Amino acid sequence: MLLLGLVPLACGAASSERALSPERAAVVAAFDQHVKPLFATYCLDCHGGKKVKGDTNLRFLTDGEIAMRDQALVRHALTKFLSHEMPPPGERQPSDEERARAGRWVAAVRRLAPPDPGTHPVRRLSKVEYANTLRDLFGVEPAIADELPHDVVGAGFNSSIAPLLMEKYLLIADEVLDRVIKPGQMKLAWRAGQLDAQSEGKVDAGKADGGERQLSGPVQLGSVLPAPVDGTYTFKIRAATEKIGKEPLRLALRIGTQVVGELKITAPLKTPATYTLTAKLPAGRAPLTFIVVNPVVQPDPDAVKPPAVTKPPTKPAAGPKPPPEKPAAPPVTGDQPQKRTLWIDTIDITGPPAAAPTEVQKRLFIAMPSKDLDKRAAARQIAEAFTRRAFRRPATTSELDVLLRVFDLADQQDEVFAEAIKLMLKGVLVSPQFLYLAADTSRGSPDQIVRIGDHQIAAKLSYLFWATMPDDELAALADQGKLQDAAVLEAQIRRLIADPRARAFFDGFSAQWLGLDRLATMPVDEQKFPLMDAGLRRAMYEEAALLFETVLRENRSLIDLVTADFTFLNGSLARLYGMENEVKGSQFRRVTLSDANRGGLLTLPAVLAVTSLPSRTSPVKRGRFVLENLLGQPTPTPPMNVPSLDQQNVAENATLNLRRRAERHRSDPACAGCHVVMDPIGFGLENFDAIGRWREQDDTNLRVDASGELPGKLAFTQPKELKRLIAGRRDEITRALTHQVLSYALCRALDGYDEVVVDDLSAAIAKDGFALQSLIVRVAMSYPFLNRRVTR
Amino acid sequence: MRKHWLIDRRTCLKGLGGIALGLPLLETMGWAETPKSGGAYKPPVRLGFMYHTCGVWADAFWPTDPTTFPVSLPPSLEPLREVVDQCLLLDHLKGAEDGKPWPPPHCRELASWLTAAMPNRDKPGELNLAISADQIAANSIGIYTPVPSLELGYKDNGLSGLGEQGFNNRYYTTGTWAGPTQPLPVETSPANVYKRLFSSRQSKRRRVGGPTVDTGKFATVQDDTGESLDRSMLDLILQGAKDLQGNVGRADQRRLDEYLDSMRSLEKRVTAIERQQAEAAAAKAGTGKNSKAGFTSAPPIEVKVPTGSVKWSEHIRVMCDLMILAWQTDLTRVCTLIPGHVHAISYPEIGVPDSHHDISHNDNPDKPPKLMKVDRFAIEQFAYLIGRMKTLKEGPGTLLDNCIVMWGSGMDQGWHSFKRLPTIIAGRGGGTIRTGRYAKANGNIGDLLMGILARAGVPMDKPIGCGTKLLAELA
């Protein structure tokens, strides 16, 4: 009884859920009414009953409930059905109305997914984003981050920070800060006793509390001078000597191995004087040495021998006191050489003359300690202003407190202010708040859907379009809370797109969409394609970028990406087009194409090259590219146990060209499902070699046969006709591109409710005349981009 | 007596973003690990893993008659002739399995090689694999060395995006994993590796108020005010990051955990260095527990780090040299060397400009000869590494005697099978591996990895991937 009581309870919960959703019930019913009969009529002969081709068995889909449970299978089947791949040619074909009915059911299933924008976990800045952000914060070249490993945002982006990455972030932070924050004017106030002295072969190491020194005979006084920048430095030295002979004491200053100046010391020990010397020094640490050039005076034969040898004065305890009484400058007498005595105390080094602060420095050091502002308060102001930009939002009090404690660390070590600030900024640059595009921390209950805050919107937009931090305008709007206003938001999106920095969008997006990030480094058989040097690779990329940007900026239809009758060429690229007589030099210019076989994504050398193998074309890769990336139809990898391409008869295959071999391969029913679409497209592009040059003969010296037929009896004989057929599938292309852009913008693979969003966006974009600009603006204003589900 | 070589006396390890890593004088460098119980000094076992993509051309790789091995060698193994006595050829080693449908074959070959696990198939775009064997070792024996492990490569493995069937491209480029969601980047530039190991970045003296006298001595951690400031700074930032953790969702917390782990790993490095320094100082003063009396080793090898682009073979050899150097100086005990994206390798240098992946699908009679060339080339590089290690004296034996270097691929050959992973083990693992023979493995890649790690003193309290036991055929 107990058992019986429990079971209905469990069922009850499930069925009440079903009952609560009339939409779901309708979809279940629609399957039985509309879809099941289609399967029975067109599919089950091969995918059910006796035969189960392509591992697809539809016999078990006996009612709508089961279909809902095994959606992956239904979707797989209907995708093939809708794309005209199935039923295969030669079999009975459904009417357009029947296909449309299936399409409506697929869309209705998608709509059952509850709205869910996803959780927006934090994401690490990519290499490019990190480099650009450093550029915007400090005015350094983005190349400063070249040592970081390559990565590109988009679906599949990995956000983890490996220890190696952390090490490099620290190194780069050091480098950036050393470049930007130069200690202003160096001011060193040394005492001679702090320097190492070497006199008559004896070394007397300097002490931190050393004072004046009195030395005689051959003397060297050394230290290391850390010149912060190139420039002119002034040395002020307080010194004295006792006069012996006619010549004054000559004190040379050597930096490294170079003598940069000489002082003539004449002041008597009773009244030391300050001597000044200026010298131009390169930046860097270098040994500094004072040397007495004439330490010993040879006897003067004419002089009279003095009554007694002068005793050297005793060293005073501390401080620059006047030296003890001594007989005034006795002449050198007798036949013994005499040593000179050098008394030396303070050595002040300043320089170079203070340079005007750079714009970057002004922006960093918005406050300086003064009588009215203590240094900690100044540091706090600096931290507040800097984190507002580096964290892309105002920092919290506790975040600022952490940074102030970092400032204290250095400050307590008697660092100069700029150096202490430097350590604090370094702390910012290795903080998670800087390295991750942070989640919105605004509270919400678990699974609640909340709109993201202004600062996060601003950051998401600027990293999406510019791959860097928000500029002042966007940041100010975020501060004012205005980005929640749709009109303001849209205007900002259009402004970002129009800016030249929006190239960053293509750079990132084309990596995910077209795989163009591979272009620069992918292996190509250099013997076979000597043209394919670094310059040509760059030119190919530039051409693709210019095509995309033109369609975007001129607010053209995204279908123009396929059908464009213009392109952009420079001299090296023109050789691929056979237009080297018309276009010369390294500058790109817009060229109208007279040959309709050229133009558009399908025939872009960049795309043709990345879908080729190092030494030959790959029709299968090209076909798959068009199918997956342009038309949005995923293709499975070949079944595991089927010999790939044409292993069946190796000897015979050797005598066939690629096309004939592929045709044999396609005769295998396990492969036909995909290859029946992929191969005709790929072979339709065989007139273009592995780097995108036009050719009439393929590698086996057979004439290229570019004719083929797409499902639905759509025949073509040349690339231009193939292009037209593909371009005709506007809705599929629009949906596929929307899917790609949304996935890129969200930096994740799409699933569930995202598909509904893509449907809605695609429909709206179609109404906007398929404008590419509209697509991108709409994605950036879409529900999943601007909302998030709160996680526990 | 000091030997002249590339690292001069002023070299201090400052590779770590400003954290001072004072390297003791090299002749006093010792292993910070104290021997378990008295007896003769025993150097630690060090581990190397060298990958070959897309399997091998089986006909030229496996001996037709194993009983004649190693007297007669299959064509692809011919380059091993001089060092084959140091090698164990392991046949019939099974690939990773988890009883579920396979992901695309090239998606798993490299990803499963050191993890013995399979990419998660539920969300193929999101990385979810397992920690790799080298990282398990790094977490254990790596704590004794300044660098827990070195991940080297020839091509950047940072590729993002999705590949076949929506599987994340990182599965195709990454063999070393710090955790299920943490693929590790490789260092591809020999100069950067060198810098990381032996950077001679000058210490930044922050005290500008008074003179500092450059006496040419080694800077040490204790002496360097400026540098220890950095460590304290990191501590504070780390603390701040922990506070942040309470404010974010679960997924974000995981990211922050990874961040904190990376920060802590920097600290661990410093600790290891300090320990090595103390050990070395004690050994020099004759007060150490670690008696190395009578234990002499070859001086660290000289490595010429090339600038600019080089041929692939040169690139590999420099990387091999750097591994040797790191092992000799005990800067690390765990190294991996992985070519790059399994689909994007080609060998123009030896006249095979084709895609290696393409020719590995040996569906055309002109492909096997090319494939053989590629395999042979890979074995030549491996033989170079082994050959050089064999010449370097270390105590009573050689460096190689105290290492285990595993060469292999995560798939049999282009036909996408995983029943006979090409595998060669070189080195005697401190006398725990019997080399110079052919053996039929009774187990899978997980069992092998467990057998190897156990020999390096890594506690095997948890299985690695699909492994269930220590592979018996090693001994």
Image: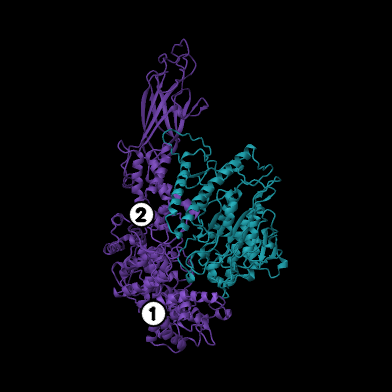
Chain colours: A purple, B cyan
The one nearer the camera, B353 or A662, is A662
Residue A779: x and y in percent read 34, 67
Displayed quadrant of residue B48: bottom right
Residue type at mark 2?
Arg
Q: Quadrant of residue A368?
A: top left
Looking at the rendered structure, the secondary structure element under dot 1 is helix
The disc at residue A392 is: 2
Can residue A599 be spotted in the picture?
no
Decide if residue A565 is on the left or right side of residue B337.
left
How far apart, in angstroms, are the residues tagged by discs 2 and 1? Answer: 48 Å
Classify the position of the C terminus of chain B by image quarter: bottom right
Question: In the depicted view, which residue is nearer to us: A69 or B187?
Answer: A69
Check the residue under mark 2 and report the chain it is in. Answer: A
The residue where tag 1 is placed is A722
- How busy is the neighbourhood of tag 2: few (under 14 within 10 Å), some, or many (20 plus)? many
The reply, left or right, for residue A177 in relation to residue B88 is left
